[in-house]
Image (cartoon, helix red, strand yellow):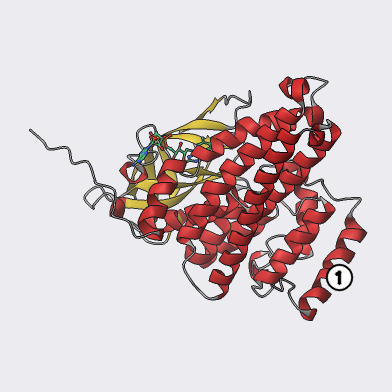
Amino acid sequence: MDLSYGPEYEEFRKEVRAFIETHKDAALPATVRLDVGRGFRKWQQTLVENGYACRTVPAEYGGFGAEPDTLKTIIIDEEFRAARISSGMTNQGISMLVPTLLQYGTEEQKQRYVGPTIRGQMIWCQGYSEPGSGSDLASLTTSAVLDGDEFVVNGHKIWTSTASEADMMFGLIRTEPDASKHKGISYLLIDMKSPGIEIQPLVMMTGQAGFSEVFLDDVRVPKENLVAERGQGWEVGKATLLHERNMLGAADQTDTMLRGCFDVLEEYDATDNAIFRDRAMKIAARTLAMKYHSLRMLTDRLKGRSLSAPALITKLNGCQLNHDIGKLAIDGMREAGLFRRGCERARDDGFWQSGYMFQLGLIIGGGTAQIQKNIISEIGLGMPREPKTVVKAK
Ligand SMILES: Cc1cc2nc3c(=O)[nH]c(=O)nc-3n(C[C@H](O)[C@H](O)[C@H](O)COP(=O)(O)OP(=O)(O)OC[C@H]3O[C@@H](n4cnc5c(N)ncnc54)[C@H](O)[C@@H]3O)c2cc1C
């Protein structure tokens, strides 16, 4: 099987390598967490300007404006990964909102939000989940009524990642109380500095407050911040979730983690041990399967086929695999695996220990593993739909 991409693309690969060679001293290592990353804007901007991040975002919205070419995107990923330098920020704004706005946003919304977001100047959070609405997201009750030119929003979001750092939220809000559950929701862009927003950070087991509760009390949102039509929010929100699933389980991130894990195993002489070698081989095989799955998705994308079920598989497998790689690295360190972030003897300031705990959360975030399996079985394998529980009124 010939997996090379042909002469035109190998020329492009040389260009990418030359860029990396020229900029490698200014580059950030691939292991640095760039999700919020205001401090990492400079590197992000260099990447955007040279077409190595957000490459296909049209130039009129602040991007590089390259023609969509998935093979070139893959070559960039491959080369940055091989050089072990960061290929840019992957946060909810860049990876989820920008493609959604390009598909559904008004001209004014694209002009206003896309450029600052891809350059890391505008940070977003995702206001979907509520205390009573997680897996059954369409039951959400945070609501808005139109008052003149503004929506007035009231309600309570939870598990909102990066809310305390965010400038803006993209949220699902019930605006059509008389419509059916899914048709009553709208997709609103909410300024996090608006009066009436209160953010209460929630501490995760990593010890960091990665997400928050967000209370919205008579928050006024200009009606031009509605994306698509009133009541079309479920459709728009699902498009955003598809991008989230690709972001959370991306095969290139897994491959980078696996390489880092192998370094750890070597450093602690764990590769001399047959049990560790066996575990490492099994995990390497799963990572390779993920890579081929992402190549299959590439074919699907080029042929215009639906990516819904493959993206669910990416999310389900990628997040579990990242968690398992973290566990292998920690076990490989033996006693040193017990050191946590902040302890001076922790390798890479506890990157592996924190990552192991954080990745467990990502198996839940963006839709739990059980929900991913349900949907894969229904839309991917054509199995019967899950029975709905009907509560009858007395
Ligand atoms: C690290 C992290 C980051 C997050 N970031 C965000 C964010 O930025 N924005 C946001 O809006 N939300 C975020 N979330 C919330 C996340 O989307 C929800 O936690 C998730 O959708 C599950 O909802 P829930 O917590 O209400 O659990 P529930 O829906 O109450 O589920 C509880 C358990 O029941 C199982 N279950 C429920 N229904 C079914 C079913 N039909 N079949 C089988 N099993 C079922 C679930 O799999 C789970 O194990 C984040 C969560 C985590 C952990």
Percent position (x, y) of residue 150?
40, 49
Percent position (x, y) of residue 270?
79, 32
Kind of residue at disc 1: Lys
Q: Which residue is mark 1?
A: 14
> Farthest residue toward the front?
274
The reply to whether residue 394 is in sight is yes
- Which residue is more in the foreground, 224 or 317? 317
Percent position (x, y) of residue 148?
35, 51
Percent position (x, y) of residue 108?
53, 64
Residue at (33, 46) in percent of width and height: 138
Image position of 95 (left or right of 105): right
Which quarter of the rendering shows the C terminus? top left
Relative to 335, say whether 322 is above or below: below
Q: Quadrant of ligand 1?
A: top left
Image position of 4 (left or right of 365): right
- Which residue is more in the foreground, 54 or 75? 75
